[in-house]
Amino acid sequence: MNENNLTEYQQYLFDHMYSRLKNATVETDPFEYIIVKDFLPDEEYQRSLDHKSYDRTDLSRAVAPLRHFFFDTFSNAKDPKVESFNLQLTEWNQGYSYRPHLDGGPRVFSMIIFQPEHDLHPWLGTALYRKVDNDFRLVSHGPYLPNVAMAFPCGFDHWHGNELQMEEHRRKAMLCFFYNQKLTEQHGWDMEGYVEYDE
């Protein structure tokens, strides 16, 4: 991907997201992460709520160059470069939970854009944990609120997950992953929001 070859609309999306990110505070407990409100322009956020019709092309290409911001912002990224990016649409329902885990393997940075249609379930966001002996202690979480993004470097002791969802509610989000290798469909990845970097 030539990062200087964005369309006018993709550049508009990038500029908006970058302006929100650069004003965010880096939290350090239990590890480095940032939370950003009003991450997408409102019209793009509203379109993204309809997963069946949403075209990820513009947003994927606009998010991909943010890798430079994350390398400049986080002090302990595990890899010196990122070779590809993917944006996935996800939904969870009542009864869902995800044990504390690490986004390891080829992932260098992870970003989650929460997509609730209201602000009634902030506790359904991504939970952040500290490992204590053979168990995990919940420290904080990214709030599941409209158009809020949460980003962090992967690996090390960056344990995160989702507490059990008791509410009868469809939980939606966009998952943005920056990889240290190029992916193929043979790996079973969702390739619609996939971008490769030129260098």
Image: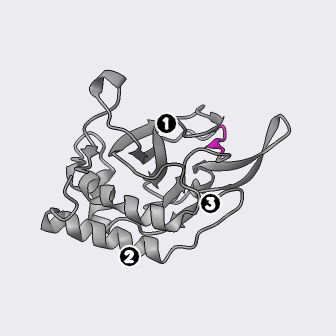
Mark before the other along the chain sequence, 1 or 3? 3
Kind of residue indicated by mark 1 = Trp
Q: Quadrant of residue 152?
A: bottom right
Q: From the top left corner, tell me how far across and down residue 174 is, in percent.
A: 40, 47
Q: Are the residues flagged by discs 3 and 2 in contact, CB closer than 8 Å?
A: no
Q: Residue at x 44, y 45 (%)?
A: 172
Q: Is residue 109 within the magenta segment?
A: no
Q: Are marks 2 and 1 in contact (CB under 8 Å)?
A: no
Q: Residues within 10 Å of mark 2 (few under 14, many from 20)?
A: few
Give how far apart the Cα atoms at labels 2 and 1 are.
30 Å
Reading the chain from its start, which is encountered first: label 2 or label 1? Answer: 2
Lateral position of residue 149 relative to residue 127, left or right: left
Residue 171 appears anywhere in the view: no
* Amino acid on which disc 2 is placed: Ser
Q: Nearer the viewer, residue 134 or 117?
A: 134
Q: Which mark is residue 19?
A: 2
- Front residue of 143 and 25: 25
- Is residue 178 something one can see in this rendering? yes
- The residue furthest right is 133
Residue placed under numbered mark 1 in the picture: 92
Question: Residue 87: x, y in percent?
Answer: 34, 45
Mark 3 lies on residue:
32
Residue sitting nearer the eye, 187 or 172: 187
C-alpha gap between disc 3 and disc 2: 19 Å
Q: Magenta part of the protein: which range?
A: 159-164
Q: Is residue 83 left or right of residue 111?
A: left
Say which element carries label 3.
loop
- Mark 3 packing: few (<14 Cα in 10 Å), some, or many (20+)? some
Q: CA distance from mark 1 to mark 3?
A: 26 Å
